[in-house]
Image (tube, rainbow, N blue to C red):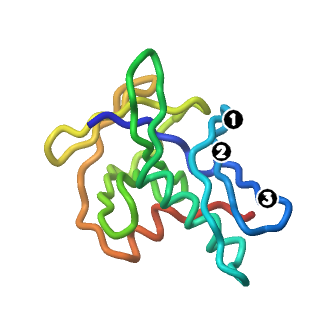
Amino acid sequence: MEYLVFDIATVRYRYNATRTTMSAFAATGELLSVVDLAPGCSTKEAAYLACDAALRSARLLRAEMRYAVAFYNPYSADVCVGPALDAKIYTNRTPLDISPSGAVARVNGAELVVEADSPYVLHLVSPTLASTSRALAAHQI
């Protein structure tokens, strides 16, 4: 499967007027997800849910190709592919230079190859709930 990797620090979040849904947008303005929120849901939890929904179901069309969404966390140098309970985390601990419009990535066995300015090869690590949460950790909202 092919992915568009977005730097999670560039994702923008927006509540609706009644704060019952949150939307996540890529830096390009593309809608990544919309989630319904339970009463009393914190902003951080709402952002996490919006990112998880994007990983689970968002598909973006670029150059007549459909891409799933993946997120790069610049603070941990991890890329998260797939929703929280089924996530795969890839890393090589080298900071990636991801364009605001995203970077195309392909899974190749236990590696994720990110086509940025220069190709990056990241290796699969055993995901745990803690590592998945770290990979999805949103910047301060």
In the rendered image, which residue does mark 3 sit on? 16
The quarter in which the N terminus is drawn is top left
Secondary element at image label 3: loop
Residue 83 higher or lower than 99, as above or below: below
Q: CA distance from mark 2 to mark 3?
A: 13 Å
Instruction: Kindly identify the amino acid type of the residue bearing the numbered disc 1.
Output: Gly
Q: Which residue is depicted at the point 55% across and 66% down?
A: 49
The first of marks 1 and 3 along the sequence is 3
Quarter assignment of residue 14: bottom right
Residue on which disc 2 sits: 25
SS for dot 1: loop
Element type where label 2 sits in the image: strand
Q: Point out the tag, 2 or 3, that comes first from the N-terminus.
A: 3
Front residue (pair 73, 48): 48
Q: Amino acid at mark 2?
A: Phe
Label 1 with label 2: CB-CB less than 8 Å: yes
Q: Which amino acid is tagged 3?
A: Asn
Spot the residue most to the bottom: 40
Q: How far apart, in angstroms, are the residues tagged by discs 1 and 3?
A: 16 Å
Residue drawn at x 61%, y 33% is 100
As drawn, 66 above or below 131: above
Q: Nearer the viewer, mark 1 or mark 3?
A: 3
The residue shown at (62%, 41%) is 31
**Disc 1 target residue:** 29
